[in-house]
Image (spheres, grey):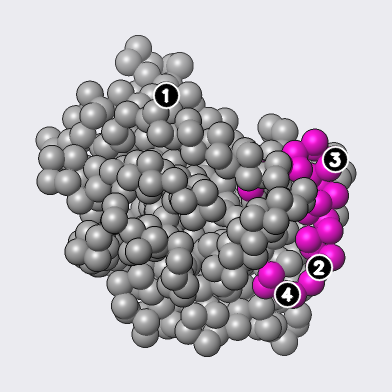
Amino acid sequence: MKGNDQPHSQLLLMKDDVLRAVKEQLAAKEEIVLPAMLRLQGEADKALTLKPLSVVYKKNIPPSGDKHDYISLGRYWWPNPATPDGLPYIRRDGEVNPETEQQEKYDRKTLGLMVQAVATLALAYFFFEREAYARKASTLLRTWFLDPETRMNPNLNYAQLIPGRVTGRGTGLIDTRGFVLAIDAAQLLLGTDEWSLAEHRALQNWFKAYLDWLLNSKHGRDEAAAANNHGTMYDFQVAAYALFTGETALARQTIVASRERRIAVQIEPDGRQPLELVRTKALDYSVMNLTGLLNLAQLGQAVGVNLCQYRTEDGRSIEVALEWLVPYLLEPEKWPYQQISPFEPKSAYYLLWMAAHAFHNQRYARYNLELARKNNEEQLLSFLYPPVV
């Protein structure tokens, strides 16, 4: 039985009805979807050539001595020019240290490659029904999460460390927000000959352990207390993993609490997000946080919570934040706050797509198309799944 012959009611971010509608358009060879489908097929073919991806292949040894532990470097931390050994590292907000992307030392880039590859391959299998895509996606999932020789330990004890300062931080939990896409990929593969129910349950058990770590570790508690986008992304991950592992009450509790903990705190009555506006890439972070809130809103649909309808007495809401931000997505050159590097529109495409579905408002979909045409990127796959950044 092919996994794409059955409904995928448990998808978290991907939308089963959208996927099926697009597949019908593809079968009818409708021009509107063909460029994106050609791109998807090309990216999936490239993913077939990937070597196995695992935390154990790095040369760097985590402080625990166990290569199964994930390790990453704080993105905006750089060697100290005032000391001979560069320690302790110093912060340059918004400036990414290229050392963070070194796969022989750290796992962040490898994790991103894995997530993007399994999502791409699972989608390509859904649309094109080529067994090689499902086989490769399943292999990547097994290697990262299940195989005793290569699996990642379900913790982020050493995420976003700062040499000379700390061996890990709560802020590192944001590194794994892309895991939700890996879960959706597994949901698409379930029922195929390549991804068994037993493996799916083993994956759920991995996320049960990871969810427990998120809830009870010091790093997890620190991130839960974060007021800005880090707190939003923490709630998003907890709710998503709770839904995947059957902890529905925890998912609902987290999403309900986000109304006052996140929306009411982060958004001003006029729609500004002050905690993101103080950053050196204020537009990027405003988009990221609002995307996290919309992702939470989508998860809320599974537990009967409508975050999009929530509005404080003085008018704070997801919608007012969206309306304030949209003009700057269309014309980022008019952004009045700090943005030390050019704004990458790929995150805006997904935000607008999510907004169109969340508010049943095709105006946002038209904005998305307008932005894509402006950037000559109409073949983007943002209507299917978000980028991992």
Residue 374 colored in magenta in the image:
yes
Characterize the magenta stretch by its predominant secondary structure. helix
Using the numbered discs, state the Cα–Cα distance from disc 3 to disc 2 in whole angstroms: 18 Å
Residue at the image point whose x is 30% and y is 23% from the top: 104
Find disc 2 in the rendering and name its residue: 362
Using the numbered discs, state the Cα–Cα distance from disc 1 to disc 3 in whole angstroms: 33 Å
Q: Quadrant of residue 239?
A: bottom left
Front-most of residues 128 and 169 = 128
Residue at the image point whose x is 38% and y is 41% from the top: 132
Give the residue type that dot 1 points to: Glu
Front-most of residues 147 and 223 = 147
Find disc 4 in the rendering and name its residue: 359
Give the residue type that dot 2 points to: Gln
The x and y percentages for residue 322 are 75, 64
Identify the magenta region.
357-381
Using the numbered discs, state the Cα–Cα distance from disc 4 to disc 1 in whole angstroms: 40 Å
